[in-house]
């Protein structure tokens, strides 16, 4: 009898099958993920979780006899009152003579819960979203070169000397040119030393041979410059894999906690999204009232502020930060602006001008999110006037710049809006809500 | 009976165990199983596994190594989700019909449970696998692990060479037909030279022995010639009708390429390997349960099991053999452990303490004693259906209160056909036996005709026993798979076996480029 302890075997033996299953059920799982994400809070948007899959689509059919119709026999235990020939009214649902018959193959066809890991969830969550205009600025710069091996060369720095290759070349050359081996010379020398005095003729012959060999040894070097090889490297330009994300938000008195919450959810999504595409993502928070300043996250979301609303100040601040720290040549720049749409009327032209001429040319993408109150807070028939900022931005959007704008009233809309903004499309920016 | 010699120390105390405990337990169990019960088993290999590995084994139908397919991932995910939600416990063991016989035991089990599992699987099931005629006829315990290894390698190879999608599609199709990929009857083996020679010699010998020159002079008519119609001829050539659909495809599908045929062969070989298990569920579990019950009882008698362990065992044992009555909400069919165990115990009782009724029903074994010899013979030579027909005793029918209800869809009421009384015993035996007969429970589908020279339309018949048709949605899907593999149109007729009337027809055409290149538009 053998006892084998299999507990230490590597786990995850079923991983390959699992991946195949996920690929198979991809459309179903994707749908389930999106449905479940509506009910999740943003904080755990990228956590692992369970989704419920309908059994159709991934079923394995087989020839089975139908569960109804025809003549059926039931053998049941526990008879108490029935006699031969009794009739029993058919139980509702057409089942057998009482009790619940399992399905014939013992496999139910109900939905089943399917647990996804965090990676799998985020993958599906952000799947088929694309960064707009990603190709535009794959900047090559001197520091971002990467080197990779590319064969051998006959010249190079001593640090890159390919020793094995060099010695191999030298060995084959020495064999080809019949350079005498050290052992052969030693043998000749010992033979000469061992000779008796009377064998002068032999001695002369051997000494001539030794001289000839020694001469060959000097003529044919052990390692010749011909043999030397160096490891060769080639450089490849590496695209810049870093992005900066600007979060602009109006924090004037008209922005309620609810609006800020909506904006935050949007930023979080954008952050998760960028994080998956770039190695290095930095976030800059700029809040503004009638003046703007760069702040940390805590202040950005939670510290109250009062004042008027002048949007152009935020854009100016952003422009300053870009000029100071994030050169567009080195960074992929994304901006997301959240506002309730208010702006001082006189500032609209200035804002449009700044956006068109300084911000957008440097940005990969600029998203404007107009957060409003819950739609149900408005009485029916109440018509909202388009906000100042909305009107201004609509004009800009029509010109086909990398910019998009959406309105969000409830947090369940955040994810769909986000998807809309980043869904792959043909004509970037030529759209309005 | 045997004199009980008490051992000095119990095998273990408390729930903890280690490998030396397992070894001791195995040896003690083996002592009882082989010397007292006379079991004949393959050498044992006991493998300790954890939860994930048990789930893993579940999803690949219990086999330790298996090729890759998404459906196994699906089963794994489903079982895992159920297990995590606490809706489903895991089996204590899984045992594989191989030589050496591999039993997986869970590391979460207590020492008592490990003893039970070893008695149940490593000796009960093991004995059954080694001795039952169906397993001997249909499975090759020595070769199965090697074959699975080959299958896994071959399929991985195909994936590399022809792409995962192509292989996956083929496997999908093959799995859909797996239930109809077994030979139900042993087939004629291809003649080999040596046996042909022997037969020729025997024939000549026989001719010489009965030689009588007079026969030469008897006038005889023209030798009769059997004329096969063209249709019969082509059927005979293709060995039609045939119920092993995958076998038929492997040998005759015109458009499959060699690797596809080999994959079909792998799938049907594995289906064939499991074929005996589906026919002996009741007996196999009955045998294993009876064996573990005998062994555990004896170990307790000798003092090798503590009273505490025995109580723990009995609790688990009674759970396993619990049979709810039909009006109980927990009822979900007849529990094979319960019925199997009850029948084995009943046979032992008939051997040792028969009633007058038993003597009348089972004259061959009643009162003859030596119940183990009888049981070993039963385990070797019966399958569920014949076992019930032969050994379901009136006493047990009464004890279980078995009754037979007929549900005819054309009648407004169900009707009680037989109950546990004098008139009903035979009927109940017969009816219950049928429930365990694969010929009655599985759909009887056969490939009946195809004109390879003509339109190559494949025609199958489903003989709809008791007018029970196929589940339509599934049948359509499977038929599509079948058409994809066949490469031409497929027609399935559902036929009433009584009147030969066609009840329903399903047809499918191959989707181009799915598995084979489809010609002729």
Image (spheres, coloured by chain):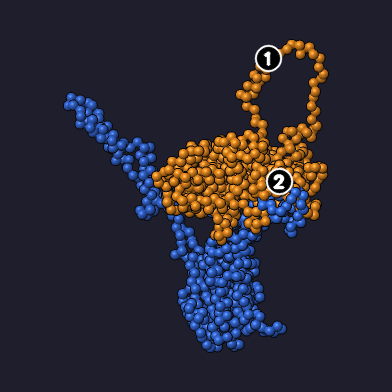
Q: Is mark 1 on a helix, strand or loop?
A: helix
Q: Could one spot residue B316 in this view of the protein?
A: yes
Contact check, label 2 and label 1, Cβ < 8 Å: no
Query: Residue A127, position in %: x, y?
Result: 59, 63
A147 or A214: nearer the viewer: A147
Question: Which chain is drawn using blue?
Answer: A
Secondary element at tag 2: loop
Q: Tell me which residue sits at (57%, 83%) in the image.
A: A256
As drawn, is B75 to the left or to the right of B447?
left
Chain under numbered label 2: B
Q: Position of residue B83 (x, y in %)?
A: 55, 57
Specify the subunit that label 1 lies on.
Answer: B
Where, by quadrant of the figure, is residue B373 drawn? top right
Q: How crowded is mark 1: few (under 14 residues within 10 Å), some or many (20 or more)?
A: few
**Number of numbered discs:** 2
Q: Name the residue rendered at 53%, 76% in the picture.
A: A247
Q: Is residue B266 above or below residue A427?
A: above
Residue drawn where x is 68% and y is 48% of the image: B402
**Image quadrant where residue A335 sits:** bottom right
Mark number displayed over residue B421: 2
Find chain B in the image and tell me its colour. Answer: orange
**In the image, B310: left or right of B168?**
left
Which of the marked residues, 2 or 1, is nearer the chain's N terminus?
A: 1
As rendered, which of A271 and A226 lies closer to the eye?
A271
Q: Which residue appears farthest toward the front when viewing the image?
A: B356
Question: What residue did someone put label 1 on?
Answer: B209
Is residue B41 in view from this perspective? no
Horizontal and vertical percent position of residue B270: 60, 42
């Amino acid at each position: 009898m053998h006892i084998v302890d299999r507990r230490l075997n590597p786990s995850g033996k079923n991983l390959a099958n699992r991946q195949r299953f996920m690929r198979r059920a991809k459309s179903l799982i994707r749908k389930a993920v999106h449905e479940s994400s509506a009910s999740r809070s943003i904080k755990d948007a990228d956590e692992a979780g369970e989704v419920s899959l309908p059994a159709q689509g991934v079923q394995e059919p087989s020839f089975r006899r139908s569960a109804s119709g025809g003549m059926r026999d039931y053998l049941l235990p526990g008879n108490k009152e029935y006699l031969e020939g009794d009739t029993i009214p058919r139980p509702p649902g057409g089942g057998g003579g009482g009790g619940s018959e399992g399905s014939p193959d013992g496999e139910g066809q109900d939905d089943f819960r399917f647990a996804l890991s965090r990676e799998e969830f985020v993958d599906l969550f952000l799947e088929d979203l694309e960064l707009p205009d990603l190709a535009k600025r794959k900047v090559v710069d001197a520091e971002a070169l990467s080197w990779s091996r590319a064969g051998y060369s006959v010249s190079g720095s001593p640090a890159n000397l390919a020793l094995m290759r060099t010695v191999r070349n030298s060995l084959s050359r020495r064999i080809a040119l019949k350079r005498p081996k050290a052992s052969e010379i030693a043998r000749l020398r010992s033979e000469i030393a061992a000779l008796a005095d009377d064998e002068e003729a032999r001695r002369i012959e051997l000494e001539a041979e030794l001289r000839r060999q020694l001469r060959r040894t000097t003529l044919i070097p052990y390692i010749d410059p011909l043999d030397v090889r160096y490891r060769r490297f080639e450089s490849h330009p590496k695209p810049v894999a870093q992005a900066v994300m600007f979060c602009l938000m109006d924090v004037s008195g008209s922005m309620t906690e609810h609006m800020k919450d909506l904006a935050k959810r949007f930023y979080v999504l954008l952050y998760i999204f960028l994080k998956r595409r770039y190695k290095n993502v930095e976030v800059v928070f700029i809040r503004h009232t009638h003046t703007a300043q760069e702040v940390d996250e805590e202040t950005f979301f939670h510290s109250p502020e009062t004042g008027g609303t002048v949007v152009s100040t935020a854009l100016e601040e952003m422009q300053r930060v870009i000029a100071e720290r994030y050169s567009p040549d080195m960074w992929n720049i994304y901006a997301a602006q959240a506002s309730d749409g208010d702006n001082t009327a006189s500032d609209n032209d200035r804002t449009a001008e700044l956006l068109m001429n300084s911000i957008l040319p440097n940005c990969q993408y600029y998203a404007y999110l107009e957060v409003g109150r819950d739609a149900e807070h408005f009485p029916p028939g109440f018509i909202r006037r388009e906000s100042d900022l909305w009107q201004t931005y609509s004009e800009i959007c029509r010109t086909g710049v990398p910019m998009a704008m959406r309105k969000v009233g409830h947090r369940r809309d955040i994810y769909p809006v986000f998807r809309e903004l980043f869904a792959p499309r043909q004509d970037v920016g030529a759209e309005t809500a | 009976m045997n004199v009980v010699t008490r051992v000095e120390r119990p095998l273990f105390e408390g729930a903890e165990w280690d490998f030396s405990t397992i070894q001791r337990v195995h040896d003690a169990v083996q002592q009882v199983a082989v010397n007292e019960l006379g079991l004949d088993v393959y050498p044992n290999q006991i493998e300790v596994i954890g939860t994930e590995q048990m789930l893993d084994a579940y999803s690949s139908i219990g086999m330790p190594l298996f090729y890759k397919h998404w459906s196994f991932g699906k089963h794994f995910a489903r079982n895992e989700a159920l297990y995590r939600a606490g809706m489903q416990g895991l089996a204590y063991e899984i045992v594989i019909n191989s030589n050496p016989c591999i039993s997986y035991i869970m590391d979460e089990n207590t020492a008592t449970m490990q003893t039970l599992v070893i008695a149940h699987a490593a000796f009960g099931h093991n004995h059954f696998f080694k001795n039952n005629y169906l397993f001997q006829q249909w499975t090759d315990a020595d070769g199965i692990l090697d074959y699975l290894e080959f299958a896994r390698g071959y399929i991985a190879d195909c994936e590399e060479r022809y792409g995962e999608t192509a292989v996956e599609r083929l496997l999908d199709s093959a799995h859909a037909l797996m239930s109809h990929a077994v030979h139900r009857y042993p087939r004629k083996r291809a003649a080999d030279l040596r046996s042909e020679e022997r037969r020729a010699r025997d024939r000549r010998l026989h001719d010489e022995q009965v030689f009588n020159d007079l026969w030469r002079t008897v006038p005889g008519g023209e030798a009769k010639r059997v004329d096969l119609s063209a249709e019969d001829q082509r059927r005979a050539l293709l060995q039609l009708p045939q119920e092993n659909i995958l076998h038929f495809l492997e040998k005759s599908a015109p458009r499959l390429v060699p690797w596809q045929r080999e994959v079909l062969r792998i799938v049907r070989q594995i289906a064939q390997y499991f074929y005996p298990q589906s026919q002996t569920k009741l007996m196999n579990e009955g045998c294993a349960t009876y064996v573990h019950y005998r062994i555990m009882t004896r170990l307790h008698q000798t003092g090798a099991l503590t009273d505490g362990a025995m109580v723990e065992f009995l609790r688990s044992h009674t759970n396993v053999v619990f049979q709810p009555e039909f009006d109980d909400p927990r009822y979900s069919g007849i529990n094979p452990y319960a019925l199997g165990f009850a029948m084995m115990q009943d046979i032992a009782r008939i051997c040792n303490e028969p009633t007058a009724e038993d003597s009348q029903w089972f004259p061959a074994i009643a009162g003859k004693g030596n119940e183990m010899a009888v049981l070993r013979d039963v385990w070797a030579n019966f399958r569920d259906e014949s076992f019930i027909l032969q050994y379901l005793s009136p006493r047990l029918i009464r004890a279980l209160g078995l009754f037979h209800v007929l549900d005819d869809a054309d009648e407004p009421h169900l009707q009680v056909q037989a109950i546990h009384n004098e008139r009903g015993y035979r009927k109940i035996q017969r009816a219950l036996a049928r429930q365990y007969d694969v010929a009655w429970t599985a759909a009887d589908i056969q490939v009946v005709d195809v004109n390879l020279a003509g339109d190559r339309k494949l025609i199958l018949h489903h003989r709809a026993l008791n007018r029970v048709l196929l589940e339509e949605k599934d049948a359509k899907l499977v038929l599509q798979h079948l058409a994809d593999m066949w490469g031409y149109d497929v027609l399935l007729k559902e036929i009433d076996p009584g009147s030969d009337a066609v009840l329903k027809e399903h047809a499918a055409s191959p989707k181009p480029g799915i598995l084979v290149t489809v010609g002729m538009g």
